[in-house]
Image (cartoon, rainbow, N blue to C red):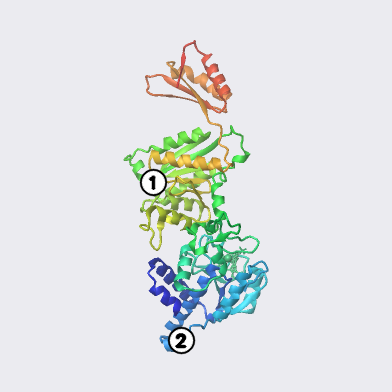
Amino acid sequence: MEIDKAIRECADSRLKTKYSNAISVIKRAFALYSIQEVALSFNGGKDSTVLLHLLRAGYFLHRAEESCSQDVVDGENTFPIRTIYFESASAFPEINSFTYEAAATYNLQMDIIRLDFKSGLEALLKANPIRAIFLGVRIGDPTAVGQEQFSPSSPGWPAFMRVNPILDWSYRDVWAFLLACKVRYCSLYDQGYTSIGSIHDTVPNALLCISDSNNSEEKFKPAYLLPDGRLERAERAKKQLSSISNGLKFKDLNSDSVLTASVIAVGDEILFGTVEDKLWSLLCRKLHSIGWAVSLLAVTRNDVDSVAEEVERRKSTNDMVFIYGGVGPLHSDVTVAGVAKAFGVRLAPDEEFEEHLRHLIAEKCTGDKNEMAQLPEGITELLHHEQLPVPLIKCGNVIILTATNVAELDLQWDCLIESAKSNGDLVLMAPFVSKSLATTLSDVEIAQPLSKLRLQYPDMNIGGYRGSRKGPLIVRFEGKDPTRIEAASQSLCQNFHSGAFSQIE
Ligand SMILES: Cc1cc2nc3c(=O)[nH]c(=O)nc-3n(C[C@H](O)[C@H](O)[C@H](O)COP(=O)(O)O)c2cc1C
Ligand SMILES: Nc1ncnc2c1ncn2[C@@H]1O[C@H](COP(=O)(O)OP(=O)(O)OP(=O)(O)O)[C@@H](O)[C@H]1O
Ligand SMILES: [Mg+2]
């Protein structure tokens, strides 16, 4: 069988693994359902073209195993699996003609359905004993969220099993397969289209454009030359830049409003006292400098449930949560998993993130499966900046920082602020201003006037601290309005003899 032979003979071990896993899924489906009970959902797209050939190979191998003899296996072109195509008036003519051409080449028994998906499937299932449908859905597709290789149809849909043999395939894997097997695919993919929807919303991928100033006609490179699979749906890139503000609802705020953040450090080494964490104080100062208040600092153990519990609690009571530590490939690096758990989603391979890691650490860490490229499914946005080798990860209102020291945090913070500013949505809050007064008055003398002042100026943070029991007491006024700070400090001084307080930096 030519597909099976092509993969067996190729040198790409990752593709071999993906192929053999997909074939196992297909064989499992053939063990559960009879051939009359399964269907292939085929639309001429690249993913469904991969699926068509996997099914041809899978059916051949299944028959070979069943009969235990190559002699009785039907010809390679026998493919008795019902194939359904939802034809639409807004499909590209090239997609239609490729679909019909494939049907003729591979003897597909095509059912052409001219209804919407749901009504079409209802009619199909009423007239046929179909119980399972093969789909070319891949993780990263908007419809893949929550799906497994075998997923029952959604509530409200007719009942059948969705079988997704290439769920964990990446864009690269798809092209590696189509090129290794030397099979035909829709001609649009050679004209710069990387994912094909309707004629109304699909254009060639601008990242494949070959610009030629002398020639007004645009030309495009083929889809398999897209440098990174992460750019398959190019419009996603635009979305990511404006994403920082999404969780923050900045637009409805006055510039002197206060937003709150909490900071979570993950690390047994901090709790043991072995390592002194310097990041939290720097992060507090940074947040402060953009007018944010830090409501809580927490340190958790390197344990998924501890991280999940803390994140879950903080994300609902703060505008933003910053978390660091525990990010990487070690068994103790559980932060990303903890964040996923806090949001009640699973970790799924993120093709875009994997491409970044591949560039960073070459092939060292990217085998058949790259654990570091697993991110919370459906809620993750990657925050890019040209100075960051790997983007920052944002899940809802939680930002995962990968910094491990002060210099790295400095860089990540600057990139975060710069890209937030450049997208125009992020209104940085008015920074806090403060005034500190030192006094040798005793705590007892000053306690009552201070607590009165707090009631008078509820918009301000008024507090006292001392460096030692015997040394001077420092009273600190902090807020967003310098005139109120001045008024409050004057008001305190008036209660005591002149010279009782001296201002310090
Ligand atoms: C065979 C088949 C089965 C589908 N089953 C479901 C389903 O169970 N639940 C669901 O929400 N959508 C289902 N869909 C719809 C897809 O998830 C998705 O809405 C559609 O492929 C998106 O196409 P569009 O981008 O052209 O709207 C199914 C589609 C097909 C072709
Ligand atoms: N009109 C349709 N008719 C039949 N099946 C469809 C149709 N549209 C989608 N599907 C099924 O859903 C799967 C996912 O669709 P999707 O558009 O993501 O992939 P594709 O069309 O194969 O490739 P591409 O991402 O390049 O467009 C398809 O592989 C196919 O199984
Ligand atoms: Mg498509």
| Position of residue 417 measured from the top left corner of the image (x, y, whole percent) | 51, 40
Task: Measure the alpha-carbon separation of dots 2 and 1.
Answer: 58 Å
Depth check, front residue: 399 or 215: 215
Within-10-Å neighbours for mark 2: few <14, some 14–19, many 20+: some
Observer-nearest of 108 and 132: 108
SS class, disc 1: loop
- Residue type, mark 2 in image: Val
Cβ atoms at labels 2 and 1 below 8 Å apart: no
- Camera sees residue 461: no
According to the image, label 1 marks what residue? Answer: 301
Q: Residue placed at 41% from the left, 54% from the top?
A: 359
Name the outermost residue toward the front: 214
The three-letter amino acid code for the residue at tag 1 is Arg
For the residue pair 454 and 4, the one nearer the viewer reads as 4
Above or below, comparing residue 358 to residue 309 in the picture: below
Which residue bears the numbered disc 2? 73
Identify the residue at horizontal 56%, vertical 32% (top origin). 430
Q: Residue furthest top?
A: 497
Q: Position of residue 14 (x, y in %)?
A: 40, 66
Q: Position of residue 315 (x, y in %)?
A: 52, 45
State the residue at coordinates (52%, 17%): 492
Which quadrant does ligand 1 occupy? bottom right
Mark 2 vs mark 1: give the one in front. Answer: 2
Give the crowd class for mark 1: few <14, some 14-19, many >=20 residues within 10 Å: many
Q: Can residue 418 be seen at all in this image of the molecule?
A: yes
Position of 455 relative to 228 (above/below): above
In the image, the residue with mark 2 has its CB under 8 Å from the nearest atom of ligand 2: no
